[in-house]
Image: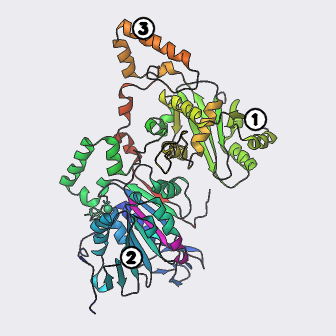
Amino acid sequence: MAKRLPPGIGEDLDVPLYFNPYQDEFQKARRLRHCLSCKTTGSMNMMSQFTCPTCGIAHTSNLTAPRVFNNFLLLAGRGGGKTLIGAHAVREEMMVPNSIGWVMGPTYKILHDSTFPTLIRLIPPQWVENWDQEHMELRLTNGALVAFRSLEDPERARGPHGISWGWFDEAAQSPQRAYHVFQPTLIKAGGIVIATTTVLGFDWTYDEMERKALIHKEPGYWACRYWTEENPLFKQNPVMMAAIEAKRRTMPPDFFAQEYRAERRNATGLIYGKYFPKILVRGAGIKRFIPEYPDIDSSRQAIIGLDAGSDHPFGATLSIVTEPGIITVQEYLKRQVANSMHIDNIRYEFQPQRFTNVLWAANKNEAALRLEAALKGVGIMPAESKHEVGIQRVQSWCHSNQYFIYEDNCPKTAAQFQAYRYADNYTPDGTKKKNEDVHKIDDELPDTVRYGLMAFPSLPNAAIAIDEAAANRLAAMSDRDRQELEQMRKFTQKKTDGDRELQPTDAGFPLGDFHGASRADDFGEDGPVIGGRGNYVEDFW
Ligand SMILES: Nc1ncnc2c1ncn2[C@@H]1O[C@H](COP(=O)(O)OP(=O)(O)O)[C@@H](O)[C@H]1O
Ligand SMILES: [Mg+2]
């Protein structure tokens, strides 16, 4: 029987791949292996062969020379070249004889219209042993098998054991369960996952991969994010760049940021998301708060918030009370040590003895932590533990422009704050749960701030917080309107106590251009991010 070839095979073999630094870094990270016999890290060649540069062993299995990274996440805007570089990557992977690889797409349509043809066009016809259209499986002459699966049903990600690589194209649109179902099939061959995707707010690729690679620097995770306009093909073509620019001008900014810059914006239920980036302070901006920085004056009030927990990392933040507001200047996030050790570590890192007034605060239910700290001479204030109340307190500080994070020193706090969100509060039958719960992942550092602010006796000074637009509007009102507004304010003041959400009539309630403040441009200087930490780097924090 003559061998069958998949349609389009080899058609793009001559199409040049231009240099894109993110795609390039991804390929480099993907090729890294660690020789277990001499403990050296080196790179595979472009045919996925690895000969240890030190001891010269030619490894044929990931088990004798594992991958430095085994979970890859490429986030990019539409047309950023995710599918193309994913295809180049797995084309190299399938050069390993007798390996099994899976290409997965969220729907048959996406798989069929984009992922499949992009990959097939990069494969030389002479590599092909046979193409099985019915099962969507490609057998190569080197014995490698490549299977294509669409994930309308996540159970379809359940493969045989011993898969070497799995590629989730448009991963965010695929069910999280598919990733969970697929992962165990990689154990036997020490395989890797590659996820290439545009984002859907804080979708599962954030929880499973991005935060592990970029915030926690967990071994084996690698991630990068880049923009559509960084596609080298578009970059050199003014018509294409103009098309992107037109989108930027006409699309809602958050939608543009999501679709073209892969920024996680539109998540419903983001708790502090709308205060970004205005609560971030960078570089010399710290001097506006603490002119004497980094030698913080000992007379300043310091607040140390703690979040203990055995099943998640121990978090702590140091915040300083200043004229323009409270600013978090140091952070601590570590797991797997006893509470008493954390107290010592935090004292070492934050140097609280340099301050005359230090307030330590933790969840009031953490009796054991208070006891351990007390033995070390640290008194911890029990802080109100209810989420609703504490979140409103933090929000009021943010609303009134009086809470800030010094991002240079506290990148994890900044990242966790931005991602902090309500859990999916719908039960499987579609009804809404009565109490809104917070998504219990990466909430340690926001919680430390929450406890700190709950224990701190002052409320934000709303009077100074009214922004210019609101002040102008107030000034333009007739005397009578202003009087009515005042009366309404007094009325609401009487009806409620301290812990409540700001009302539209409150001073400090954001008005005017406040909502317009978070334009895509404001995030521009963040730029794209890239990186991860290998499995075999020494400095585990
Ligand atoms: N580095 C590159 N060199 C040349 N062309 C590229 C490069 N990256 C992407 N492209 C091209 O840009 C277009 C969009 O790429 P694609 O991989 O489909 O984007 P995405 O999957 O991110 O939406 C395709 O025509 C692709 O061939
Ligand atoms: Mg694509």
Name the amino acid, label 3. Answer: Gln
Residue 478 lies in what quarter of the image? top left
Figure quadrant of residue 525: top left
Residue 494: numbered disc: none
| Nearest the eye: 228 or 387 | 387
- Residue 141, given in percent of the width and then of the height, sits at 36, 88
Callout 3 secondary element: helix
* Magenta run includes residue 255: no
Name the residue beneath numbered marker 3.
483
Which disc, if any, is residue 147?
Answer: 2
**Residue kind at label 2, given as amino acid type:** Ala
- In the image, the segment drawn in magenta is 184-202
Callout 1: 10 Å neighbours few (<14), some, many (20+)? some
Q: Residue 379: which disc?
A: 1
For the point 52% across and 28% down, which residue is it? 396
- Furthest residue toward top: 479
Which badge, 2 or 3, is on the more N-terminal residue? 2
Q: Helix, strand, or loop for circle 2?
A: strand
